[in-house]
Image: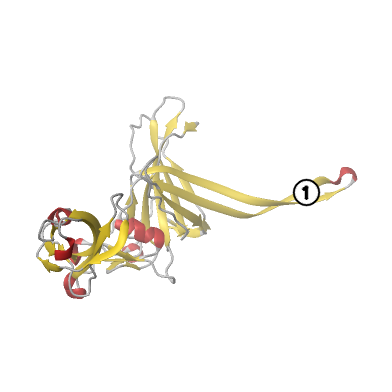
């Protein structure tokens, strides 16, 4: 049998030990992140070769291969908060229990002051939903003069806050730039803290895809299992107003590990292809082994395939 491959994989990252992300602890074996919006998924192997060379022409006589590496790279079209935490190693939480449950969210907007110097910021606040207010207390606020081209002049106007409005008498009838903070309900905000001593972790990864069988053109399920991958902590997020939208790359180094169903040998990766007669298109994982994972190995409430 021969197969063609022209389908991306759906990926699941499982905790390979009890893993805490923010305030949530994921038990060993528990799915941490699903990716079903991947653009590409690439499995790549590399190795080095050393040669004994000699004789006339110094030709190669014997080869030794080693330093094998296996990498699995996934490019995702979309990114979730927990996906960013997995990718970056950042701590993820909802800061509803600190600062009185409020989060300061930075905003800059152009506005016009009326004849009495009143500046209405209702439109700038409406995108943040009900309950959003102009930040007070320790949140700074600057009302800045601007030139006709929109650049700031360095002139600062003082004002007082009342609800969604600011009154700055000396800014009357002027166009200004307001730099301020919005107070948001912390339960509606995901916050990821990237610190110098945190890095992306290690996971048990399964990738489910489809291989097309040459003889009848049927798509059959295929499964890749990488029992121990370390996500590389290098990442970049491009923010551009033109061209293709940003994609998010999960670059993983594979290390030897045991799969759930075979504790006799460590592997870098297992590829399974279900050569099913009359198979219909499917993207469900295929794990045909007879033995199941014990509950205490993968966490309570998780059913092994």
* On screen, residue 289 above or below 155: above
Q: Residue at x 33, y 47 (%)?
A: 78
Residue at point 39%, 64% (across, down) = 89
From the top left corner, tell me how far across and down residue 136 is, in percent: 17, 71
Quarter of the view holding residue 115: bottom left
Q: Which residue is mark 1?
A: 62
Q: Position of residue 125 (x, y in %)?
A: 16, 57
Q: In this view of the protein, can residue 7 be seen by the observer?
A: yes
Q: Residue furthest right?
A: 56
Residue 293 in sight from this viewpoint: no
Quarter occupied by residue 180: bottom left
Q: Residue at x 18, y 75 (%)?
A: 137
Task: Say which of 270 and 12 sits in front.
Answer: 12
SS category of the residue bearing label 1: strand
Q: Give the x, y percent position of residue 45.
A: 56, 48
Number of numbered discs overlaid on the protein picture: 1
- Left or right: residue 184 versus residue 270 is left
Residue 42 rendering spot, x and y as whole percentages: 48, 44
């Amino acid at each position: 049998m021969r197969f063609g491959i022209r389908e991306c994989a759906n990926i699941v990252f499982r905790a390979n030990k009890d893993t805490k992300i923010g305030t949530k602890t994921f038990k060993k074996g528990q799915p941490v992140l699903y990716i079903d919006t991947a653009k590409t998924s690439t499995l790549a192997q590399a190795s080095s070769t050393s040669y004994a060379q000699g004789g006339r022409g110094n030709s190669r006589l014997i080869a030794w291969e080693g330093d094998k590496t296996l990498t699995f790279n996934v490019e995702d079209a979309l990114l979730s908060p927990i996906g960013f935490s997995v990718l970056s190693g950042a701590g993820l939480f909802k800061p509803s229990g600190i600062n009185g449950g409020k989060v300061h969210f930075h905003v800059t907007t152009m506005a016009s002051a009326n004849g009495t110097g009143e500046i209405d910021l209702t439109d700038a606040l409406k995108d943040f939903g009900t309950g959003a207010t102009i930040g007070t207390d320790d949140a700074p606020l600057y009302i800045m003069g601007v030139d006709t081209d929109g650049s700031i002049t360095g002139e600062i106007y003082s004002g007082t806050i009342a609800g969604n409005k600011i009154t700055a008498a000396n800014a009357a009838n002027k166009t200004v730039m307001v730099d301020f903070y919005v107070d948001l309900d912390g339960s509606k905000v995901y916050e990821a803290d990237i610190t110098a001593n945190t890095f992306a972790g290690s996971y048990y990864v399964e990738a489910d895809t489809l291989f097309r069988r040459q003889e009848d053109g049927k798509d059959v399920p295929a499964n890749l299992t990488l029992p121990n991958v370390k996500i590389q902590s290098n990442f970049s997020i491009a923010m551009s107003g033109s061209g293709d939208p940003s994609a998010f790359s999960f670059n993983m180094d594979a290390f030897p590990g045991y799969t759930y169903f075979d504790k006799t040998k460590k592997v870098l990766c297992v590829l399974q292809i279900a050569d099913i007669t009359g198979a219909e298109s499917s993207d469900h994982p295929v794990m045909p082994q007879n033995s199941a994972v014990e509950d205490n190995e993968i966490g309570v409430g998780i059913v092994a395939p």
